Amino acid sequence: MATKVVMEALSPTMEEGRLVKWNKNEGDAVKTGDVLAEVETDKAVMELIARGDGVLRKRLANEGDSSPVGTVLAVIAAPDENIDSIIGSAAGAGAATSGQAAQAQGSAGAQAGGSNQAVADTKETAAKTSIPQSPAQSQGEASTSPQQKGAASQGAASQGVAAHGAPPTSAPPRASGPPAPRGNGASRSGAPSATGGRQRTSPLARRLATERGIQLGGIQGTGPSGRIVKRDIENAKAAGGTGRSAAADRLATEGDFKDIPLTQIRKTIARRLAESNGPVPTFFLTSEYDAVRASELRTQLAEMGDHYKVSFNDIVIKAVALALAEHPEVNAHWLNDKIRQFNRIHVAMAVAVEDGLITPVLFDADRLSLWEISAKARDLAKRARERKLMPEEYTGATFTVSNLGMFGIDQFTAIINPPEAGILAIGGVEEKPVVVNGALEVRQRMRVTMSCDHRAIDGATGAKFMQTVRQYIENPLSLVI
Amino acid sequence: MASYDVIFIGGGPAGYVGAIRCAQLGMSVAVVEREGLGGTCVLWGCIPAKALLEAASVATKVSHSADFGVTVADVKLDYGVAMKRSRAVSTQNSKGVEFLFKKNKITWIKGTAKISGKNAVSVTIDGKEEKHEAKKAVVISTGSRVKGLPQIGLELNKTTVLSSDEVLVLEKAPKSLAVVGAGAVGCEFADVFAAFGTQITLIEALPVILPLEDADCSAELTKSFKKRKIDVLTGAKISDVKVGKNSVTMSVESGGKKQTLEVEKVLVAAGRAPNIEEIGIKESGVHLTERGFIKINERMETSVKGIYAIGDVAGPPMLAHKGQREGVVFAEFLAGQKNVHQVNYGNIPNATYCHPEVASIGMTEAQVKEKKIDYKVGKFAFSNNGRARTSGETEGFVKIIRDAKYGEILGAHIIGAHATELIHELAVARENEYTVEEVDLAIHAHPTLSEAIAEAALDSLGKMIHA
């Protein structure tokens, strides 16, 4: 049976993608999981993976073409299969709206799934997973287009529940996610795979895949006789997976957050402040921290060897993560009708890239050691600059830290990345005269400014958080223990 | 000089199983073993100890037989007879390994081996040295030994301060025995001798007995031991040890109280050391770990090409079944097999054969907590299990710790009759990544002790039926 290769929504906010490069030529044999092409999304260059086996019979898009999500880009089929009708209809769909293309995809997905079990599983996942608005969406980078709405409603119709109950402003990424994997999700383990044999999967791997929306078809099992086991699912996730955003998954798990209903006073504060000061009524808190000990710690760690080296930025991220654990009211999103406080702490760090900026996320930063933060931050920053980040690596933060210290900036204010309730701007560490116990001393100092969304965070709340951050930064031993 | 594909140094569980698997895969194999085949396990460990524990079990059963309507008059306990039976069982098992060697055409070189250069092993037999070539691999499977506690004055002397080796051949049970170290070995011998009428003091430096097991199991076993009048001293510090000809005295401080203890004999059941001396490891340049074991990778390779290590000598857990599996995995890698299922060190069952038995697999609750995993516990007491009531063995429970979200079985802990047999349902479940739901879905026969496992799985899901 022929498989259509479509422009997939490779990030939660993606509406269209530009085909950068074809990796396969017409006539090449392809297998499920093969990389067919590279596609540039709104933030990164990603791989487009084959969802079926056969021969790449026809390429319908050229390198450099931009196509809306859902557009048929190529056809994989048996060497002698007649694909004229598919090409014909694909051309039609491409010319019309991508909504129709998505519709075709949706039904293709449903066919692939087949069993009732598949549908039930999908529903369960969707119901459990209400996905918060991703930062990029509310910044207006991805205002919902008519096409996407079409796709969203189509997705919702086929799933029955997805869009239902989500906050009005947050178009659920899953509705715009790749429709193809949905039907043939985890539950197909017992069904014949495209290669003819039975797909061997452990029950635990199956549950993990279902919960995380990872498609088993493209995964190479490493268990006995090629069985897909837990580590394969985890590796698939780490490698970007093929399903919906893992970041959203991380955030949206039931029990990982607490929604605080708005009191009358909160509503009034929010309305009045927004009237007075733009949609995100921001105020700023600046503090100067003593960085002598932090700086000594860095020196000492560096002396222990390269392996132990950490940057000021790592120290700040760890301090912020621990402080967020103590101040859940700051580790929050403003969702217009409620404040969502997160139990897990995912700290984003702003990284300057060639033509803009991106905020990769250190997930569960409070549970990472200083060295883990250091290693992850370095890796994320490097891949951010190479535009190699997966969407789930730069979405799903609960709070953000921006550091311009390395550019010699003493102090600045950062702009909140909604719906996050705050952002911390870190200036450089500098020697300054300071009065200590009545005497003048030269000490290393760092200026930190927090921007707070006043609808969610009040002055005193922010100030207490800043005090806790100070404690950690000025007593950095607490960050290594 | 003879030439083989593989030469194993040491014929214990790791070595003999590795040898059989190598032979099955078409390699020519020799095993150098100076004592009997089967190693510590068959001769001085697992097998004879379990034979004695069975004797203890019979003694305990007989003492309760009147409750079952069977009156046994004139019960006599004779440790010497039990000991001789256990030796016979050992010999039988060792002969069994000899038979397997013949069947698989494995050469047993009865002597003391030393690595001598690349691909070469020299063996000393009755003072004469001969050289053998190992074309593919030399495998160190020399095991471990009891090392005693000379640092606190308990140096092994074979008369009053004993290791498990000597205890296994005692002619009669001592009147009183201090067991130092309450791991599996300590708890098992405390059980054996208590059944044969010895006054036991079980002494452990850590705060609980069976410190590697789940805290609930440790507590349950302590309760049971105390009921059987075994004196359990935990968090204990031993000092002022005086070793006499016919007795040993020592001060033991535990729970804020200091007492003087005089016993006929002391069993040192703490600490084993790998047998790495005298086999030419230093000269060969094989690297050791910080704790003095041989460093290996997942293919059992040491830092020197062509030299491998398996079993106790290659690091903890020092368990026969861990060594056996390492032997198999080694052989399959060496034969160039594809998709070798590597040793899953996180899924090795622990088994202690005292009464009640204790068995476990995976993480304890404390370890799960430490890892900050969101978990749920399911527990089912054998007092609620029909089969346990019929045999009058209602002590203990099954405890299953599962991941809160996905139901993965993170750890399972069983204390009770036949726990060491029951645990394997959960070992299979974990190795194949079955969750608690799959365990429950499999129908368990009634009445069996295994039902307690299904009930514990159900309890973790909040759906227990029989309690």
Image (cartoon, coloured by chain):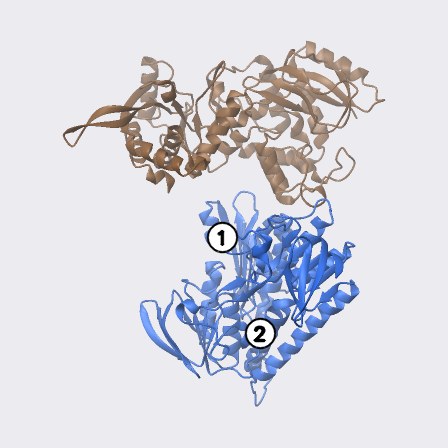
Chain colours: A brown, B blue
Left or right, A445 with reference to B226: left
Disc 1 marks a residue whose amino acid type is Glu
Q: Between marks 2 and 1, how big is the CA–CA gap?
A: 35 Å
Residue B53, disc: 2
User: Front-most of B130 and B403?
Assistant: B130
Q: Single out the residue that lies furthest toward the right.
A: A80
Label 1 secondary element: loop
Q: Residue at x 58, y 52 (%)?
A: B286
Task: Residue A76 in the image: state x and y as whole percent.
Answer: 76, 22
Mark number, residue A144: none
Q: Nearer the viewer, residue A106 or B323?
A: B323
Where A200 sits versus A58, above or below?
below
Q: Is residue A165 visible?
A: no
Residue A354 vs A258, above or below: the answer is: above
Residue B353 placed where, x, y %?
56, 68
| Residue under the point 50% across and 35% down | A253
- Which of discs 2 and 1 lies nearer the camera? The answer is 1
- Expressed as whole percent of the image width and height from the top left, the position of residue A380 reads 50, 27
Q: Identify the residue position indicated by label 1 in the image.
A: B290
Using residue B466 as the reference point, say whether residue A258 is left or right of it: left
